Image: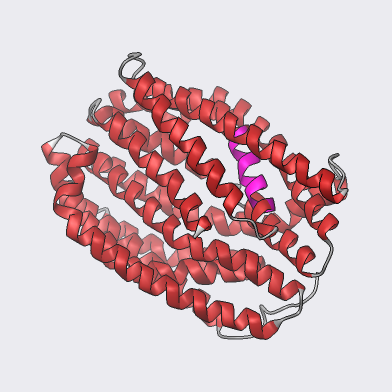
Amino acid sequence: MPALGALVAEPLFLATDTALVGHLGPAQLAGLGVAGTVLQTAIGLLIFLAYATTPTVARRLGAGDERGAVRAGIDGMWLALGVGVVLALAGWVAGPALAGAFGADAATTAAAASYLRIAVLGLPSMLVVVAATGLFRGMQDTRTPLVIAVVGFAANAGLNALLIYPAGWGIAGSAVGTVIAQTGMAAACVMIAVRTARRTGASLRPGLAGVSSTALTGGWLLVRTLSLRIALVATVVVATDEGTTTLAAQQVVFTLFSTLALALDAFAIAGQAMIGHGLGAADVPRVRAIVRRLLGWGVVTGIVLGAVLAATSPVIGGIFTSDPAVRAAIAPGVLVLAASQPLGAVVFVLDGVLIGAGDARYLAGTGVVNLAVFAPLLALASLAPSGAAAVVAIQLAFCVGYLAARCVTLSLRARGTRWIVTGV
């Protein structure tokens, strides 16, 4: 439950940002979609900072090495800081070019560039938060990430509401508010990690072996995540080609997808921590029981979320935009998203189980296979006329076709025993 709260907090406040920016106009909303895709791609590609750290920390903790567990988490945070600084500098220079690479109209590109140039400054802080979250989860502590997420993103929503409208900064105000909130979250994470290290006697200095190990372990997860981000970015590119109305509607549907996906991913996060701990303790029956329980809870939750989303689909577009054409294109896309929730639940749970087991190489290989299945489906979706038809076609390709491919490859692996490797 704490993992659910932490994961849902971020997309809910991002949804708030989308709603605030959306009422500035379609160009600003579409621009946020472009800039958000770039930023989420950067963060998403480096989610291995948490996903590689969590099972490593959990395995060591399960094997009785608490000091080594904390040290592994500290090394992950140092790696995150270094990567974040490099990305922030690169993003500051290349931000306008990245915004223009999507081929949107001039107004949308200008809005995206304005947001992106400021928001990249928060990447070092955000990546430190990601790595620290991996440490906390690996230590079987999901409450600390919950508190940090709720306080941080509540501050983000409040700052954005103040800076966008009363201060008159527009979409740039949203970026400034986000950077301030991310910096505060990173400061809180560092303070807690330092306190934990001192309690266990773990060194706070970066260890070359530990940093290198995290980077190497995360290499396969980077490939896996890259395939996911390519699929997501491709949907934005196709929506961009369909025009501003389709792109703006796709941004709203994608925001809802992110919210529901991370809600379901709470079970995957629990799986990463508990599977890693169970394998470290060499308790295979417990590991199998966890998998069954996670799948059961995940599917039931997916059915409930899908039903709620379907019931609200006629009115949900009005929360995000005042434009009639965009609202009309949102509703049918939301229905497709709602129907796919049980399928998504199985995908997210099994993905978390295999990450917790350290089966990153298999995830990387099948990620490429899944992408190959998705590509022709998205190409067919690009032939649909702009507006509601295009949004529905894109959602069918992604939420049904792509998730089904992932479900098949993950299920085949989880049914076997090759991913069950015990010990540190």
Quadrant the C terminus occupies? bottom right
Report the front residue among 373 and 403: 403
Residue in the picture at 30% in, 40% down: 240
In the image, 375 versus 414, the foreground residue is 414
**Between residues 220 and 146, which one lies in front from this camera angle?**
146
Left or right, residue 166 beside residue 390: right
120 w.r.t. 70: above or below? above
Residue 36 appears in the figure: yes
Q: Position of residue 284 (x, y in %)?
A: 69, 83
For the stretch drawn in magenta, the main secondary structure is: helix
Q: Residue at x 70, y 69 (%)?
A: 277
Look at the picture and state if 171 lies above or below 35.
Answer: above
The chosen color scheme is secondary structure
Q: Look at 49% across and 23% down and name the residue there.
A: 118
Report if residue 407 lies within the magenta region. Answer: no
In percent of width and height, residue 26 lies at 23, 31
Q: Residue at x 60, y 83 (%)?
A: 288
Q: Quadrant of residue 383?
A: bottom left
- Which stretch is magenta? 125-135
Residue 69 to residue 280: above or below: above
Coordinates of residue 394 in the picture (x, y in percent): 28, 56
Asked whether 133 falls inside the magenta stretch, the response is yes
Q: Quadrant of residue 185?
A: top right
Horizontal side, residue 391 vs residue 410: left or right: left
| Residue 365 in view of the camera | no
